[in-house]
Amino acid sequence: MEKIGFIGLGIMGKPMAKNLIKAGYELAVYDVVGESVAEVAQCGARAAASIEDAVNGAEVVITMLPNSPQVKTVMLEEGGVLGCAKAGTIVVDMSSISPIASQEVAAACEKKGVKFLDAPVSGGEPKAVAGTLAIMVGGDADAFATVEDILLKMGSSAVLVGDVGSGNVTKLANQIIVALNIAAMSEAMVLAKKSGVDPEKVYQAIRGGLAGSTVLDAKMPMVLEGNFNPGFRIELHIKDLQNALDCAHSVNSPIPLTAEVMEIMQGLKVAGMHTNDHDAIIRHYERLAGVEVRR
């Protein structure tokens, strides 16, 4: 079994690391939050004292970090991954970041003989815990083949979609579709409530038809229960949509619906709902219509 250095033990990284331990991999784990390191160490990982300590001796390094600046810091700055990784190491960045940032980091890795894959995930905390994430990968085919079995201990699918950066382009496409699905669900269910029709019955009536989706089945039951606990926080979806807008503008691809949902999320952030699950998009529509969609 490969030795793995795992850096970033947040809401997603922690269960992902635990699933690798369950699968029998030898992990050295590091995070700036010591309690997270201690928790994963109790499951069988080695608690690393630094990034360098986590990377030393590792054949594969996995990073799961909040955004592009954190990935660049962990990878490129003094004491970072590239300062101590040996040639031939494969770095798998599973963070959701800008495709341009992924390409910048990959170029630095290439100069040191380190292979880099961008491999963001979809599925949120529940699928991270279950080990059923969808993993979209960009980078070298041989490097992907080497780590594919590792990825499939954290996800139910891992697809190589193209060169470095394409994994994060795919994730941005995913996040656009998820956000617009939740917004469409919200508009429809608030309309039903305002019209005097039971939203739960509307949901049951349409879920088996063309309007049915994984998003609808995941989020509508939460809304009906008034459950806005993450899940996937609005502030993180804002980060992803900002990356989507930046990417779209850089390639001259207009995404007007994404911009509209971004402003809805920004309004919810201003209202103090930034740590709510993204199903709280419906609260924007509820406020406009003066109704609540609940069981």
Image (spheres, rainbow, N blue to C red):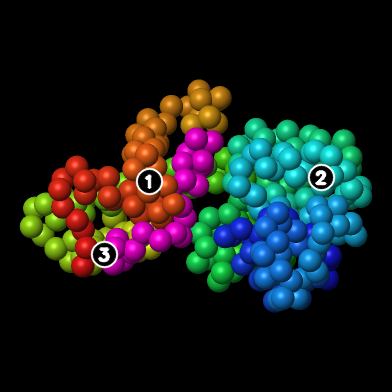
Q: Residue at x 35, y 54 (%)?
A: 279
The correct choice, above or below, for 136 with respect to 22 in the image is above
Q: Estimate the x, y position of residue 97 in percent, counting from the top left.
A: 61, 41
Q: Are marks 2 and 1 in contact (CB under 8 Å)?
A: no
Give me the residue at 71% from left, 64% from top: 37
The amino acid type, in three-letter code, at marker 2 is Gly
| C-alpha gap between disc 3 and disc 1 | 21 Å
Let me know if residue 237 is in the magenta part.
yes
| Residue bearing mark 1 | 272
**Residue 80 tag number:** 2
Which range is magenta?
A: 221-243
Callout 2 touching callout 3 (CB < 8 Å): no
- Residue 206 placement (x, y as % from top left): 23, 61
Towards the viewer: 246 or 269: 269
| Quadrant including the C terminus | bottom left
Amino acid type shown at disc 1: Gly
Upstream in sequence: badge 3 or badge 1: 3
Q: Is residue 229 left or right of residue 96?
A: left
C-alpha distance separating marks 2 and 1:
35 Å
Earlier sequence position, callout 2 versus callout 3: 2
Among numbered discs 2 and 1, the one appearing first in the sequence: 2
